[in-house]
Amino acid sequence: MNKVSQHVKTCRNRPQNDTNPGKRCLTKSQTFMAMVTMTNNDFLKSSRIKDEVFTILRPDNISFVAKNDPLICLYGEALLAKHKRQQISTVVSNKIREIARLLIAIRSLGVEAQSLFGSF
């Protein structure tokens, strides 16, 4: 991920009016990697979570785990469909980050869990 942020600083193709290109570029690259590696990537192509929640997540290890887990993505999509509040995307991003932290903790215990669904 560090190489992407270094490239963004010197890229000739980035817009000149972009104030903070590094964060957005890392977030987009994480989302792209999740779409490529996820087994059911057709779901992510048409889901609201990709457009409304993934764009506001910080590009770190927790969001990478959340974006790559299909059960976490389905939970976030269900929350988006259930609630109609204005700030629901922030609430959903916090919830999926909490669940991703849980999955990271399960993996650190030595449990062979590729996804949240496989850990139970």
Image (tube, grey):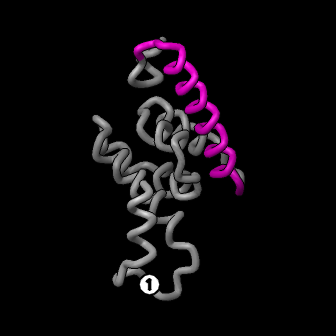
Of 85 and 104, nearer the camera is: 104
Residue positioned 40% across, 14% down in the render: 112
Predominant secondary structure in magenta? helix
Residue positioned 38% across, 46% down in the render: 44
In the figure, 100 relative to 57: above or below? above
Q: Quadrant of the N terminus?
A: bottom left
> In the rendering, at what x and y percent does residue 108 appear?
53, 20
| Residue occupied by mark 1 | 15
Of 31 and 21, nearer the camera is: 21
Residue 104: in magenta span: yes
Residue stretch in magenta: 86-112
In the figure, 29 relative to 61: above or below? below
> In the rendering, at what x and y percent does residue 48 appear?
48, 51
> In the rendering, at what x and y percent does residue 55 appear?
52, 58
Of 102 and 22, nearer the camera is: 22
Total residue callouts: 1
In the figure, 92 relative to 6: above or below? above
Residue positioned 41% across, 38% down in the render: 68
- Indicate the amino acid at tag 1: Pro
Residue positioned 71% across, 54% down in the render: 87
* Within-10-Å neighbours for mark 1: few <14, some 14–19, many 20+: few
> Farthest residue toward the bottom?
16
In the figure, 90 relative to 5: above or below? above
Residue 14: in magenta span: no
Of 99 and 62, nearer the camera is: 62
- Badge 1 element: loop
